[in-house]
Image: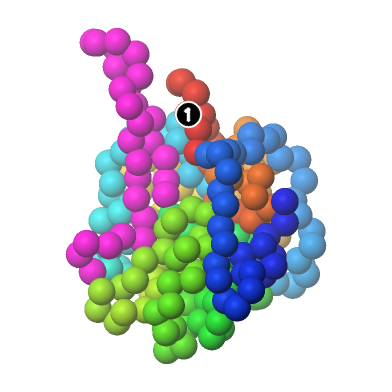
């Protein structure tokens, strides 16, 4: 299935969105998508669920660095149901945030161009001054990670700290703050980068990849229990 403007807009601006099941794509990646020019970056992230301890240092750092208002969040760490039997009980943790899709439905449905993909970095971002609050992008996002900022009333989401840490030559706040190095950030077009090496040499999956969004958030699955999106 391909994500296109036709998939999400039918008739006079009506948004139609179908997720199907809560699917995912398990894969062992050996090749990177070379469709983007090599001069441009494709910034992506890996969340290693085997290393994540659910401490939420990443969510706290994201909120502080990006001045995210109370009541909304650009990043969440979700905890599974208990696995095993007492006293041998464990949990698995997974990241919920913008996937920075190669094929972003939120961009296709935006009537004003507020939602856009930066072709130099692959980051999906928002021109806040162009946002009219129609909510089309919120409805179209298969991952339901967009929200309205209660202070400026525009669509908001993770942008890899583009205006804060990245602008200062730093890694995203979540990556910097992780005590177990469960987050890896870098250029997917650079085959020598750490993120490319991890994706090439470990089993990874992407949430709802069957929808054709081509998310750039990869996950190393937890080894206990069933992997699900």
Relative to residue 155, is residue 17 depicted above or below? above
Coloring basis for residues: rainbow
Task: Please tell me whether mark 1 sits on a helix, a strand or a loop.
Answer: loop
Residue at the far bottom: name it.
129
Is residue 56 rendered magenta in the image?
A: no
Is residue 76 rendered magenta in the image?
A: yes
Residue 115 place in picture, x, y as percent: 52, 76
Instruction: Answer left or right for 140 relative to 52.
Output: right
Q: Looking at the image, can residue 201 be seen?
A: no
Give the quadrant of residue 20. top right
Give the quadrant of residue 75. bottom left
Extent of the magenta region: 69-96
Badge 1: residue crowd in 10 Å (few <14, some 14–19, many ≥20): some
Residue 90 place in picture, x, y as percent: 32, 21
Instruction: Answer left or right for 222 relative to 7.
Output: left
Residue that numbered label 1 is attached to: 222
Residue in the image at 57% along x and 62% along y:
16
């Amino acid at each position: 299935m391909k994500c296109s403007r036709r998939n999400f807009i039918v008739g006079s601006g009506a948004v139609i969105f179908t997720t199907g099941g809560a699917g995912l794509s398990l894969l062992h990646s050996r090749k990177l998508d070379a469709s983007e020019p090599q001069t441009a970056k494709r910034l992506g992230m890996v969340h290693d669920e085997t290393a994540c301890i659910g401490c939420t240092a990443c969510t706290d750092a994201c909120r502080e660095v990006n001045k995210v208002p109370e009541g909304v969040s650009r990043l969440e760490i979700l905890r599974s149901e208990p696995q095993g039997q007492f006293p041998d009980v464990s949990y698995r943790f997974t990241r919920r945030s913008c996937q920075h899709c190669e094929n972003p439905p939120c961009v296709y449905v935006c009537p004003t161009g507020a939602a856009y993909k930066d072709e130099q970095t692959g980051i999906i971002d928002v021109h806040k001054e162009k946002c009219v609050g129609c909510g089309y992008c919120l409805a179209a996002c298969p991952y339901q990670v967009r929200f309205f900022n209660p202070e400026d009333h525009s669509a908001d989401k993770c942008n890899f700290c583009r205006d804060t840490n990245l602008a200062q030559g730093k890694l995203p706040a979540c990556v910097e703050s992780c005590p177990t190095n469960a987050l890896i950030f870098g250029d997917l077009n650079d085959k020598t980068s750490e993120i490319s090496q991890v994706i090439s040499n470990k089993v990874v999956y992407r949430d709802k990849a069957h929808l054709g969004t081509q998310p750039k958030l990869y996950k190393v699955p937890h080894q206990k229990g069933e992997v699900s999106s």
